Image: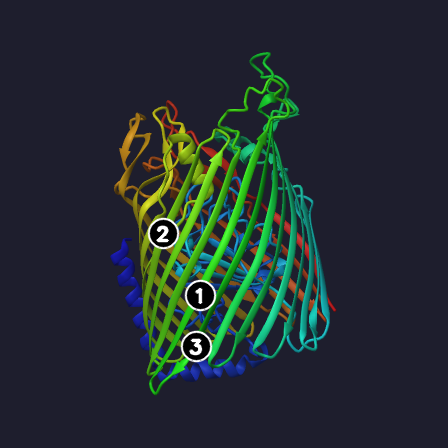
């Protein structure tokens, strides 16, 4: 399936649905079903009618001329998600790229060693560490009010948003409600237990929320983890339109696992769950990690019928300590008497990030035209440093090795955008946006390498739309944006090749159709194509070792996404989310092993980009057999993908099945759930250069994902 086929399919589906939507019988049928379901749909707001926070003027999801998905806090609770990533992989176009650590990619744009979408918490960007990993697994689900996923590149959020935006909005005290609270306890496989508690409410003009969460697990493969988090939010409401808010959160995250979490083919075939850091009864390749995060901020909002303003000032910090113990517990190499203790090292990272964002706009209403301009600015500064020590290397032999990443990075960014939203005769919309960003990066390391880099980026967006009626919208989006390399990318290129890489630039074309038919059928359909220049990937040297990240070439990604849900009657609901992707190189070269297992420079033109599945989809059914009960079944399928640059080896598809049953009794809720109930063997396979053995088999690393998980829990609201 190529882009033209996707486009034809889009038009067939969308115009068929538009024709049906104009039929009077549909309207009558929708009204009849709505009347029959008043008992379960009272006060219910459907996703397409939700206000999108990840937008300059906060419009409904239906009216937003972009591909955006919303995961509500209620959905997170009802699916029993252990973290945000588990929920995100059910969104069409979002791929679970977890290997040694959890991560996601939107439309296949993520590259190796992090480099994914912009992650926001309450609108504030999260930029943790030299790798800038997604950092989505440490946010307690109990603190999340909703998650918005902007799959179209959102230039409003600056460099990086061309790879998509994930905005996590945390809970706050509810209006017109007094003090209330909840406690939740659960226990599951691998000695996993979770405890959360919240107190929230509103007293006169002050709203507040206090949340605490604790989670511990021995892990599927004995990768032990412990996570504790606390959050305090409070706000003073000067009026219904004006609020000054304060927030504070802190998280402690500790893990103990094997180095890299990788296995080889014989280990995969013999015992997926074998403690792969056990050798001769002693721990080897052993890691321990401790991470502490702290975020505090002030937010001021004002909105009425005419004008609005939103400003946010925040500070966040994190301290990471990585104990790369490697062979700390294994004193001698099995083939010699040489000690290996010097391989153990400790890496400490510290980062401080200050961020200020402010935007505002005004609604102009004329006879048949309305116009809303929005102007916004941002300023952020990031100070990062990492220090590596070798406490067991008494001779200091490794002090100058490439593993000693003593790096200092200072990053200062400025940005300004101007967004223009027009509406003509209440049916035709036009959104125009332009943004300018500049980022200064000052880099230095222990080898006295240093550079001062200034990047200037001009982004723009154009999106006309048309409303066939108040419940439907078709739009065309064309935009250009940038992705700024992470500090590690700069480090790897400069330290290994003495080169500085360029930001990726991407032009996206997207056609979308959204329709809120009735309770029984709501849909969002989009087809897109993205052309990325200066795409970044790993480059290898003459013997197959990594030379760090580099601008490898140009790529094109096209696909189609469909999201459908509804309630057939008061006993049955359904949902479907699926996507088809084709991501190919159109230019570039890389050193890899060809079909003859010869290593050298190879042309990438026409090759599929590795690690991107052809398709993903989720099918879910909800049943309500008796009052206050719910049973949900979800089937998640991920298609095959190539694991190497030259498409020699393909990883097979897999399907997992989840089920959850819950029952409410007054203020109590009880649930049981099973994830991957058929214990499907899910692995992430890695072999970029396409290495193979004498028999032509792939020499790959495998990162094992979770198997069957069972859990029961209870929640009390008071």
Q: Residue furthest bottom?
A: 367
Residue in front for this viewpoint, 472 or 519: 472
In space, the residues marked 2 and 1 are separated at their CA atoms by 17 Å
In space, the residues marked 3 and 1 are separated at their CA atoms by 12 Å
Residue in front for this viewpoint, 69 or 274: 69
Residue 130 in percent (x, y) is at 50, 41
Answer with mark 2 or mark 1, whichever residue precedes in sequence.
Answer: 1
Residue 675 in percent (x, y) is at 58, 51
Can you tell which quarter of the image residue 296 is in? Answer: bottom right
Helix, strand, or loop for circle 2?
Answer: strand
- Dot 3 and dot 1 residues touching (CB under 8 Å): no
Answer with mark 3 or mark 1, whichever residue precedes in sequence.
Answer: 3
Q: Which residue is mark 3?
A: 362
In space, the residues marked 2 and 3 are separated at their CA atoms by 29 Å
Q: In the displayed structure, does residue 647 sit left or right of residue 214?
A: left
Sort mark 3 into few (<14), some (14-19) or many (20+) by Cα contacts within 10 Å. Answer: some
Q: Which residue is mark 2?
A: 456
Question: Which residue shows up at 56% across the image and 61% down it?
Answer: 313
Q: In the displayed structure, does residue 167 sit left or right of residue 13?
A: right
- Dot 2 and dot 3 residues touching (CB under 8 Å): no
Sort mark 2 into few (<14), some (14-19) or many (20+) by Cα contacts within 10 Å. Answer: some
Answer with mark 2 or mark 3, whichever residue precedes in sequence.
Answer: 3
Helix, strand, or loop for circle 1?
Answer: strand
Helix, strand, or loop for circle 3?
Answer: strand
Sort mark 1 into few (<14), some (14-19) or many (20+) by Cα contacts within 10 Å. Answer: many
Residue 72 in percent (x, y) is at 55, 65
Return the mark for residue 18.
none
Residue 281 in percent (x, y) is at 66, 24
Q: Which residue is mark 1?
A: 376
Question: Which residue shows up at 55% across the image and 55% down it?
Answer: 84
Q: Residue furthest top?
A: 337
- Dot 2 and dot 1 residues touching (CB under 8 Å): no
């Amino acid at each position: 399936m190529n882009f033209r086929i996707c486009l034809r399919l889009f038009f067939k589906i969308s115009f068929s649905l538009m024709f049906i939507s104009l039929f009077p019988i549909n309207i009558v049928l929708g009204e009849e079903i709505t009347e029959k379901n008043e008992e379960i749909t009272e006060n219910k707001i459907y996703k397409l009618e939700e206000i999108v926070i990840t937008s300059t003027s906060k419009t409904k999801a239906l009216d937003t001329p972009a591909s955006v998905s919303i995961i509500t806090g209620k959905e997170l609770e009802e699916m029993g998600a252990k973290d945000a990533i588990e929920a995100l992989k059910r969104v069409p176009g979002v791929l679970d790229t977890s290997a040694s650590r959890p991560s996601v990619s939107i439309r296949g744009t993520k590259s190796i060693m992090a480099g994914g979408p912009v992650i926001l918490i309450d609108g504030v960007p999260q930029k943790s560490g030299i790798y800038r990993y997604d950092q989505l697994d440490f946010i307690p689900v109990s603190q999340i009010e909703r998650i918005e996923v902007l799959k179209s590149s959102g230039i409003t959020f600056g460099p990086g948003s061309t790879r998509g935006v994930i905005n996590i909005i945390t809970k706050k005290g509810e209006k017109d409600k007094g003090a209330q609270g909840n406690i939740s306890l659960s226990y599951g496989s691998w000695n996993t237990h979770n405890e959360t508690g919240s107190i929230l409410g509103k007293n006169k003009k002050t709203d507040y929320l206090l949340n605490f969460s604790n989670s511990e697990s021995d892990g599927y493969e004995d990768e032990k983890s412990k996570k504790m988090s606390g959050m305090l939010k409070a706000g003073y409401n000067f009026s219904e339109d004006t609020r000054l808010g304060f927030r504070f959160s802190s998280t402690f995250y500790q893990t103990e696992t094997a180095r890299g979490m990788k296995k080889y083919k014989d280990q995969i075939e013999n015992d997926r769950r074998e403690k792969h850091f056990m050798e001769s009864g002693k721990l080897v390749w052993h890691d321990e990690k401790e991470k502490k995060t702290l975020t505090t901020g002030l937010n001021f909002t004002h909105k009425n019928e005419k004008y609005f303003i939103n400003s946010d000032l925040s500070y966040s910090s994190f301290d990471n300590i990585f104990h790369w113990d490697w062979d700390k517990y294994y004193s001698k190499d099995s083939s010699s008497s040489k000690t290996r203790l010097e391989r153990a090292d400790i890496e400490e990272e510290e980062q401080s990030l200050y961020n200020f964002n402010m935007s505002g706009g005004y609604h102009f209403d004329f006879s048949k035209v309305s116009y809303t301009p929005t102007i916004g600015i941002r300023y952020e500064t990031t100070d990062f440093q990492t220090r590596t020590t070798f406490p067991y290397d008494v001779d200091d032999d490794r002090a100058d090795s490439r593993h000693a990443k003593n790096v200092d990075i200072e990053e200062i960014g400025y940005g300004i955008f101007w967004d223009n939203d027009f509406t003509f005769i209440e049916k035709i919309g036009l959104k125009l946006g332009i943004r300018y960003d500049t980022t200064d990066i000052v880099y230095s390391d222990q080898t006295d390498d240093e550079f001062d880099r200034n990047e200037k980026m001009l982004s723009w967006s154009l999106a006309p739309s048309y409303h066939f009626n108040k419940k439907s919208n078709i739009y065309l989006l064309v935009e250009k944006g940038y992705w700024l390399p992470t500090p590690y990318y700069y480090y790897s290129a400069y330290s290994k090749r003495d080169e500085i890489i360029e930001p990726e630039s991407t032009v996206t074309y997207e056609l979308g159709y959204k329709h809120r038919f009735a309770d029984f059928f709501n849909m969002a359909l989009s087809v897109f194509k993205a052309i990325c220049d200066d795409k970044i990937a790993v480059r290898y040297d003459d013997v197959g070792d990594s030379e760090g990240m580099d601008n490898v070439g140009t790529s094109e990604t096209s696909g189609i996404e469909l999201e459908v849900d509804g309630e057939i009657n008061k006993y049955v609901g359904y949902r479907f989310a699926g996507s088809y992707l084709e991501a190919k190189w159109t230019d570039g070269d890389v050193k890899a092993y060809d079909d003859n297992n010869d290593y050298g420079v190879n042309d990438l033109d026409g090759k599929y980009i590795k690690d991107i599945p052809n398709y993903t989809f989720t099918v879910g059914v909800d049943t309500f057999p008796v009052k206050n009960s719910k049973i949900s079944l979800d089937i998640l399928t991920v298609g095959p993908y190539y694991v190497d640059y030259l498409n020699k080896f393909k990883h097979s598809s897999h399907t997992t099945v989840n089920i959850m049953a819950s029952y409410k009794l007054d203020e109590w809720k009880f649930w049981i759930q099973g994830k991957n109930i058929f214990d499907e063997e899910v692995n992430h396979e890695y072999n970029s250069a396409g290495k193979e053995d004498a028999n032509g088999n792939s020499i790959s690393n495998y990162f094992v994902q979770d198997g069957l998980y069972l859990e029961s829990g209870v929640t009390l609201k008071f």
